[in-house]
Image: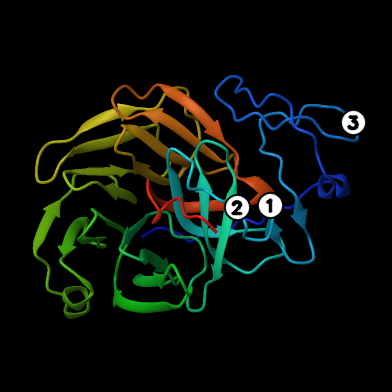
Amino acid sequence: MHQATRIALYLCTACALGAAACDDGAKRNGDVDAGDDAATDAELDGGVDATYDASTGDAEVDGGIDLSTESACCVGIVDIPADPLRVGYVGLDSGRVLPGPPVNGDVSGGATSAGVVGSTLYLCEDDGEEGHVVSISLSTGAASTLLATCTAVTTDGSRILVLANDGKIRAYANEVALGAGTASATYTLTGLVSRIAATPTELLTSWHATDRIARGAFASTSADVVLQDFDDVVFGLDLLADERLVIVRGTSDGIALFSGATGAHLASVTPAGGAVFQGVACGTGPAYCPAP
């Protein structure tokens, strides 16, 4: 099972609370350009500039961010400094963060895999003994425990996929089947696996300390995608329909995008306002890139 990890990331200077003027917004070396600091005229070096209110913990403009124009976004549990754990969304073009409702339930924020079906986020919550599957309403933040014994959880668009402590992934058609423990399919994995993601046709797996992501059709042999110059911990992953592989980096270094075919590094995104994500589910449309 994985060890749940919480990371608290704090803004290092009070001047980050001030307004900042933006430059032309060009991307440099794969990082999202942050513009210039109004006080020092210094470039903000790859981070995304965001107004941050320490009294409320809100990134950007208090939940008013419109992510509907992003090419893709991710949703997960977000840890924003001085703020309770929330459902949160991050744009993969800009790094802008849209805070959602606070999570109400037994959730620590340490899950390193996640999945969405409809308006529900699924993840595996590690309680120090064994993990249990949790469902979280994206609209209200209400969390419910559905099933004990898991290492990771994701979805393939419709089914809920649970990696159990026996190294097998079991697919459940819906929450009713999950609650009853009635799996519609079982997939046996090889090697060390602690992170999982899926599309309607493919399964992705990895260990936490690795530069290799295994991907392949369900119940078939997988092939490794080697991530270019990746020397970090995988804290979350997903694959977009356009073949971009999303990796949440494990040292609070934000999110890296790679080619799902070649492993080539494409871009890096720093979530705004000091926001930290771990397990994420990524995609397009209002379920992933909502308007406020």
145 up-or-down from 255: above or below: below
Query: Residue at left 24%, top 55%?
Result: 157
Q: Residue at x 80, y 39 (%)?
A: 20
Kindly tell me whether residue 35 is visible in this rendering: yes
In the figure, is residue 21 to the left or right of 273? right
The amino acid on which the numbered mark 3 sits, given as a three-letter code, is: Thr
Mark 1 near mark 2, Cβ–Cβ under 8 Å? yes
Instruction: Report the quarter where the N terminus lies.
Output: bottom left
Residue 208, picture quadrant: top left
Is residue 5 something that shows in the picture? no
Q: Nearer the viewer, residue 64 or 46?
A: 64
Q: Secondary structure at mark 3?
A: loop
* Mark 2 vs mark 3: in front: 2
Residue drawn where x is 19% and y is 70% of the image = 174
N-terminal-most mark, 1 or 2: 1
Could you tell me how far apart the alpha carbons at marks 1 and 3 are, in whole angstroms? 20 Å
Q: Toward which corner of the image does residue 238 lie, by quadrant?
A: top left
